[in-house]
Image (tube, rainbow, N blue to C red):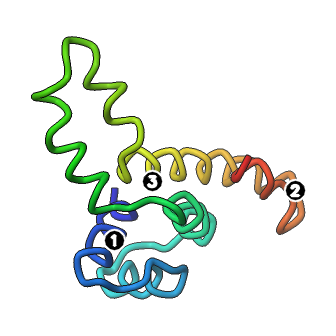
C-alpha cells in the first residue's frame, strides 16, 4: 500500500511520478524499497489521470448498481497500482531463477 500512497502524495504535490521520486519518498518514510515494484508502479500509472481516477472512485460506489461498483473501479489509479504490485510480487518470486533483467516483459504484458 505504501507504493500507492506514494503515488497519491506525489500527485497531490504536482510532482512527477518517476522511479526516482517514488524511491525518494519511500526511503524518506523509512520503507524498504523494492526496485521492481517501483518500476511496475511507474509503468502502470504512466497513462493514468490520477485525479480523474480518484474522483471516479469516490463517486462510483454510491452511483453504481449492485455489483457495478467493482466494474466501475477497475480503471482507478489504486487498482492499476495494485495490479503493478501483484506483477512485481510475481517477478520477485521468479527473480531467483532468472538473471537480472529477464522476465520484465511479464510485468508489462
Mark 3 vs mark 2, foreground winner is 3
Q: Residue at x 29, y 80 (%)?
A: 29
Q: Is residue 51 above or below residue 92?
A: below
Mark 2 vs mark 1, foreground winner is 1
- Kindly indicate the quadrant of the structure image that contains residue 6: bottom left
Report the number of discs.
3
What is the crowding at mark 2: few (fewer than 14 residues within 10 Å), some, or many (at least 20)?
few
* Mark positioned earlier in the residue sequence (3 or 2): 3
* Mark positioned earlier in the residue sequence (1 or 3): 1
Question: Residue 101: x and y, percent?
Answer: 83, 67
Q: Is residue 24 above or below residue 72?
A: below
Question: Residue 84: x and y, percent?
Answer: 54, 52
Between the residue at mark 2 and the residue at mark 1, the CA separation in whole angstroms equals 29 Å
Task: Give residue 6's mark.
Answer: 1
Between the residue at mark 1 and the residue at mark 3, the CA separation in whole angstroms equals 11 Å
Q: Which residue is mark 3?
A: 81
In the depicted view, which residue is nearer to us: 92 or 47?
47
- Kindly indicate the quadrant of the structure image that contains residue 2: bottom left
Q: Residue at x 45, y 73 (%)?
A: 32
- Kindly indicate the quadrant of the structure image that contains residue 13: bottom left
Q: Which residue is mark 2?
A: 98
Image-based side of 75 in relation to 20, left or right: left
Q: Secondary structure at mark 1?
A: helix
Q: Is residue 63 above or below residue 101?
A: above
Q: Secondary structure at mark 3?
A: helix
Question: Residue 82: x and y, percent?
Answer: 44, 47
Question: Residue 39: x and y, percent?
Answer: 61, 68
In the depicted view, which residue is nearer to us: 57 or 81?
57
Amino acid at each position: 500500500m505504501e507504493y500507492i500512497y506514494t503515488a497519491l502524495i506525489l500527485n497531490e504535490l504536482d510532482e512527477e511520478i518517476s522511479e526516482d521520486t517514488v524511491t525518494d519518498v519511500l526511503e524518506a518514510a523509512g520503507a524498504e524499497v523494492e526496485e521492481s515494484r517501483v518500476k511496475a508502479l511507474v509503468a502502470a500509472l504512466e497513462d493514468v489521470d490520477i485525479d480523474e481516477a480518484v474522483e471516479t472512485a469516490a463517486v462510483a460506489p454510491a452511483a453504481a448498481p449492485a455489483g457495478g461498483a467493482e466494474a466501475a473501479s477497475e480503471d482507478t489509479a489504486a487498482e492499476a497500482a495494485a495490479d503493478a504490485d501483484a506483477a512485481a510480487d510475481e517477478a520477485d518470486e521468479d527473480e531467483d531463477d532468472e538473471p537480472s533483467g529477464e522476465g520484465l516483459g511479464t510485468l508489462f504484458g
